[in-house]
Image (cartoon, grey):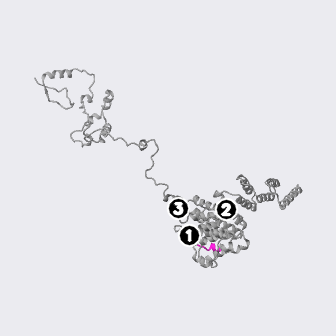
Amino acid sequence: MNCTLSSISLYPGVPSNRKFPKHIITPLMAHSNTRIHSRKLPKNHRNPRQTKLPPNFGVNLFLKKPSADFDPFYTDSEDVEGEEGEEKEQNGDIVWDSEEIAAISSLFQGRIPQKPGKLYRERPHPLPLPHKLRPLELPTPKKHVKLASSRASICKQVYKNPNFLISLARDIKGLNKNEDVSVVLNKCARFLRKGSLSLTVRELGHMGLPERALQTFCWAQKQPHLFPDNRILASTVEVLSRHHELKVPFDLEKFTGLASRGVLEAMVKGFIKGKSLNLAWKLLSVAKNSKRMLDPSIHAKLILELGKNPDKHALVMTLMDELGRRDELNLSQQDCSAIMKVGVRLRRFDVVESLFQWYTHSGHDPSVVMYTTLVHSRYSESKYREALAVVWDMEASNCLFDLPAYRVVIKLFVALDDLSRAVRYFEKLKEAGFCPTYDIYRNMIRIYMVSGRLAKCKEVCREAEIGGFKLDKQTVEELLHIEKETKMGI
């Protein structure tokens, strides 16, 4: 017997015309007539989803394009709306939202299918460190080492070694008067090169042995690998001219035309060091007339020596003018300081200023001697404010003051009647460890007297007497006069 089931349907709202056998109808009718549950089953229980299989990790399903027929994460719109939220909270069942599904799918999108073969590759072991392989003993010496006893290595160590060349001069000095220098020089002839013996000749000149220097030069002339050499010739000429052992040729113009520049400069330097200033001036003038340009340092040395003699000031003026007309100057710091000092002595303040400006514009840093000379030059010219600007430049450049610098600066402050700065630099002088000279004491006494501070005058006088100085009569008379005026005023 067949019947139609109309009371219960798997899909509500859709009539079902399916026919069931008799043995199935009775339980269904009983189920429909009797209410076992007090409430209606929720939709997710009435319409259960198919359980999902775990994804196949060998194939990335999320990288494939989804088919239009089947969506594994499809959710009916009716399930999302209505009472679904409340029913999920009551029963505790898990339903994935679209955001959760997107998060889970993103975990599989970056996965790359593995290539066939070994899944677990073994990494090679790291290379051993060199310091761990090295034995604990000392490193082995090189197999191919040049022998230090070879002739080439000894020549390189000897022919320009100052200690060895100076020791040759000492050995020559220790010879007897009858012995020749060849006794010493023949032993080391194979190790010498051109220019080596010039230092030995100069050292013999410092020892006061011009004859031995000449013998050394004559021995070098006979050695084909040592001569001709302009350096040993210049050193020998300088030593002989310094000790007045050089015979000056009568025809200096012919000599200057044939001699090299190094020999001419060595001869002039020897004459200057030997105080033969007339010969040096004459040779310099002949070289100038022959249009032979010598080094400017020679002019500086001759200016310094001639400036000490008041009778030679005219020659000094001429040399300064010649030096100023030269296009290129190559003067050292000592040469500049020497010319500036002579310029102050001759009251050629323009030379001092121009030389200082040239030196600073050349990119050099002036020394304390140059600063002091410039301050003294402007002080002698009565340009006190300009001299004060130089003092501030010295302070800004962190220039360390020496005793002559303190003397000039204190003298400048006394001329400016600046008591506070004079006292400050007087204290700085003593803090630096210098002992004040008598002219510094006298200037401090004078500025205290002008300020009317008699007690400070007496204190400086006692300090000067303790230092071993005795006040001159003029200073003593001025102090007595101030004391009388003070008593009369009281």
Q: Amino acid at mark 2?
A: Val
- Which callout, 1 or 3, points at the residue further toward the start of the chain? 3
- Which callout, 2 or 3, points at the residue further toward the start of the chain? 3
- List the residue tagged with mark 3: 191
- Residue 66, how many percent across, how many down? 24, 42
Work out which quarter of the rendered image holds the N terminus and state it. top left
- Within the image, what quadrant is residue 309 found in? bottom right
Q: Which residue is situated farthest in the front direction here?
A: 178
Left or right of 447? Residue 396 is left
Q: Amino acid at mark 1?
A: Gln
- Residue 383, how many percent across, how many down? 71, 66
Label 1, label 2: how far apart the Cα atoms are: 45 Å
Tell me where the magenta segment starts and ends, as one range. 321-327
For image coordinates 56% across by 59% down, the residue present is: 161
- Residue 302, how many percent across, how many down? 66, 70
Q: Amino acid at mark 3?
A: Phe
Left or right of 7? Residue 88 is right
- List the residue tagged with mark 2: 369
- Within the image, what quadrant is residue 246 found in? bottom right
Identify which residue, 133 or 313, lies in the foreground: 133
Work out which quarter of the rendered image holds the C terminus and state it. bottom right
Residue 407 numbered tag:
none
Marks 1 & 3, CB-CB < 8 Å contact: no
Identify which residue, 319 or 356, lies in the foreground: 319
Marks 2 & 3, CB-CB < 8 Å contact: no
